């Protein structure tokens, strides 16, 4: 009888160990599932070049941190900002601070700068002349239509002594602020995505670098004049006040400003895009 009792205890112990092992496996599976549930997908609005390319470059590293990127190409800045405010997008990456401030003001939004990433020096291009000094009297010059980049264009022409601007102002320049225009240049407002195409119709066009790159222009080689590296127009990661401090957004911000990204920007764009960190 004692022998049978000992065997029963042994069998019971084995059963308990097996059940315990099953329970342990089940718990591990549950924990793994819990970890998987912690993965976050961020939907980001971005210009195709260089913004989306930079995001694609960092995507594998971010995924290792539990953050996946769903990049939506932006062709309308105002709409992209509105979608971010409406939570259709988690964040966006295509604009500089003055543009964001203007859209916030005009559209009643409250989007915020999460982190500055890079500068895209603004340039003037032409298919008809080889140097800025060749601009003819009464030349038609296309410039961005939005107020911020319109002002930026005028400042670039003024910095190169093509025009003079009202010395009492320090920004937000309009046509009325041109105090000297000896060549009587006609500045024509054009939607930014169409500026590259405008080169066929005007003598020169002032074009944001992201659109210049999309149009296969090489800013450092092709621009008649271009901003220096000290430009104040830093391109930024933008989010809402309610999610700017979320872990996933902060992981994205940190991933955008690593030495690895700095090297990628220098190698990929050869000075047409400049790190701002």
Image (tube, rainbow, N blue to C red):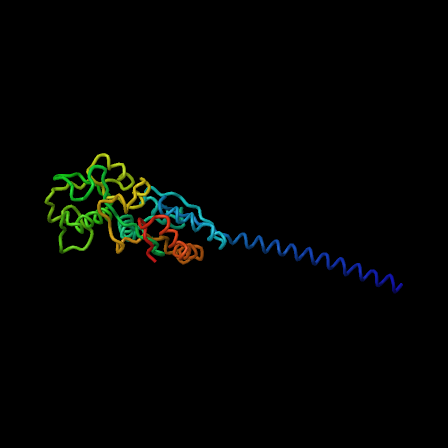
Q: Choose top left, top right, bottom left or bottom right for residue 202.
A: top left
Q: Residue furthest top?
A: 201
User: Which of the image's four quarters has the N terminus?
Assistant: bottom right
Instruction: Give above or below for 114 relative to 176.
Output: below
Q: Residue furthest right?
A: 1
- Residue 144 on image: x %, y %: 24, 43
Q: Nearer the viewer, residue 161 or 166?
A: 161
Where residue 61 sits: x, y (%)? 47, 53
Q: Within the image, what quadrant is residue 79 found in?
A: top left
The answer to whether 105 appears left or right of 58 in the picture is: left
| Residue 132 lies in quadrant | top left
Q: How many marks?
A: 0
The answer to whether any part of residue 108 appears in the image is no
User: Residue drawn 31% across and 50% down?
Assistant: 271
The image quadrant where one finds the C terminus is bottom left
Residue 23 in view (yes/no): yes
The foreground one among 78 and 45 is 45
Image-based side of 274 in relation to 4, left or right: left
Q: Position of residue 213 (x, y in %)?
A: 32, 43
- From this view, report whether residue 44 is shown above or below residue 14: above
Foreground residue among 54 and 66: 54
Which residue lies at the image location 16% right of the left edge and 41% below the top edge?
Answer: 134
Residue at the farthest bottom position: 2
Rendered view: 250 above or below 44: below
């Amino acid at each position: 009888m004692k022998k049978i009792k000992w065997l029963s205890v042994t069998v019971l112990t084995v059963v308990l160990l097996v059940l315990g092992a099953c329970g342990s496996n089940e718990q591990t599976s549950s924990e793994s599932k819990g970890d998987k549930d912690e993965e976050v997908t961020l939907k980001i609005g971005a210009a195709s070049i260089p913004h989306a390319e930079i995001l694609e470059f960092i995507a594998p590293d971010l995924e290792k941190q539990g953050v996946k990127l769903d990049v939506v190409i932006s062709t309308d800045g105002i709409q992209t900002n509105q979608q971010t405010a409406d939570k259709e997008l988690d964040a966006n990456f295509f604009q500089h601070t003055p543009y964001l401030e203007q859209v916030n003001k005009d559209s009643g939004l409250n989007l915020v700068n999460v982190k500055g990433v890079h500068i895209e020096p603004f340039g003037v291009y032409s298919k008809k002349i080889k140097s800025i000094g060749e601009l003819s009297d009464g030349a038609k010059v296309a410039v961005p239509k939005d107020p911020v980049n319109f002002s930026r264009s005028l400042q670039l022409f003024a910095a190169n002594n093509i025009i003079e601007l009202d010395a009492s102002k320090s920004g937000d320049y309009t046509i009325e602020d041109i105090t000297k225009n000896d060549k009587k240049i006609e500045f024509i407002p054009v939607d930014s995505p169409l500026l590259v195409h405008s080169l066929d119709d005007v003598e020169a066009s002032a074009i944001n670098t992201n659109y210049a790159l999309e149009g296969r222009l090489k800013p450092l080689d092709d621009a008649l004049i271009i901003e220096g590296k000290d430009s104040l127009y830093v391109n930024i990661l933008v989010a809402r006040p309610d999610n700017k401090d979320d872990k996933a957004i902060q992981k994205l911000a940190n991933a955008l400003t690593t030495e690895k990204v700095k090297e990628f920007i220098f190698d990929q764009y050869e000075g047409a895009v400049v790190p701002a960190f």
